[in-house]
Image (tube, grey):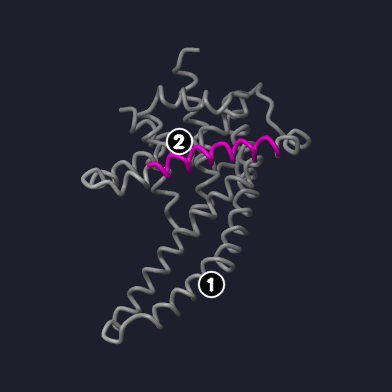
Amino acid sequence: MPMLHGGQLFLSGLKLAFSPNLRRYIIVPAAIGILIFSVTLMLLVMPLAGDAGDWLQQNLPNWLNWLHGILLILVYIALGLAGFWLSSMLVTLIAAPFLGQLAEATWALSQPNHEGQDGPRLLANIGPSMLRELHKLRYHLTRLLGLLLLSFIPLLNALMPLVWLGFSAWLMAVQFADYASENQHHDFRFTLQRLAQARGRALGFGTCASFTLAIPFLNFLVIPAAVVGGTLLWQSIIEDTPS
């Protein structure tokens, strides 16, 4: 089944990412992720959580005081998840050149004559890589906004959890397969077209990526591993799809 194949590619990426050949490429993206999360936690999540706790203390009726602790826990969880999402987005933007280098190294493992990017080429790719990430971010946000609006439509909103899950899986496949596509100098539209031709495989990969990236404190290790899996996904699609 295509979806199972996509899931297997993700798991293969997790295993391959921590192999001796690729381990050194993970250090910088993981360090960037830890730094960004720490800053987000200290400057955004904790202050907002403190303000929310004060607001609950001042505005919650006395007869609902027993709810204060429960609501505060829910607030911390919600803000924590939002902080993880924001941090992950920033990691993919700031660490884009290093994630692209990781995709190059992954591709080179099965292509011995393939030349990876190092030194000057990596530096030269910083600007284009970040612009590519902004392009992807615009693609993501405009469609997520559309789904958000659909969520308010009666009857239709009952189906939205499944729609959100499916679209999240699609976005993950787009995000992590595009590094290899970019390295091959394909435009973003080409990435979307090829993934659409192997939609089941892409959704299987993306579903695994979505659930794994939702695990707090592990997602910054999962991000580079998902790039490895996304490269394997892209490689399999390119090999199977006629030019």
Relative image position of residue 137 (x, y in whole percent):
53, 41
Answer whether residue 73 is visible to the viewer in this image: yes
Q: Looking at the figure, which quarter contains the N terminus? A: top left
Q: Quadrant of residue 111?
A: top right
Residue lying farthest to the left in this orientation? 155
Seen at 38% across and 74% down, the residue is 72
Q: Indicate the amino acid at tag 2.
A: Ala
State the SS at label 1.
Answer: helix
Which one is in front, 161 or 102?
161
Mark 2 residue element = helix
For residue 235, side relative to residue 166 (left or right): right
**Rendered location of residue 69, percent (x, y):** 35, 78
How many C-alpha atoms fall within 10 Å of the one at disc 1: few (<14), some, or many (≥20)? few
Residue 11: give x, y in percent of width and height: 43, 40
Q: Residue at x 42, y 53 (%)?
A: 214
User: Is 136 in front, or is 35?
Assistant: 136
Q: What's the CA distance linking mark 2 and mark 1?
A: 34 Å
Seen at 75% across and 38% down, the residue is: 123
Q: Which residue type carries mark 1?
A: Pro
Residue identified by numbered label 1: 47
- Please state if 162 lies on the left or on the right of 112 as rendered: left
Is the stretch drawn in magenta largely helix, strand or loop? Answer: helix
Q: Which residue is mark 2?
A: 173
Mark 2 nearby-residue class (10 Å; few <14, some 14–19, many ≥20): many
Q: Nearer the viewer, residue 88 or 235?
A: 88
The earlier-in-sequence mark between 2 and 1 is 1
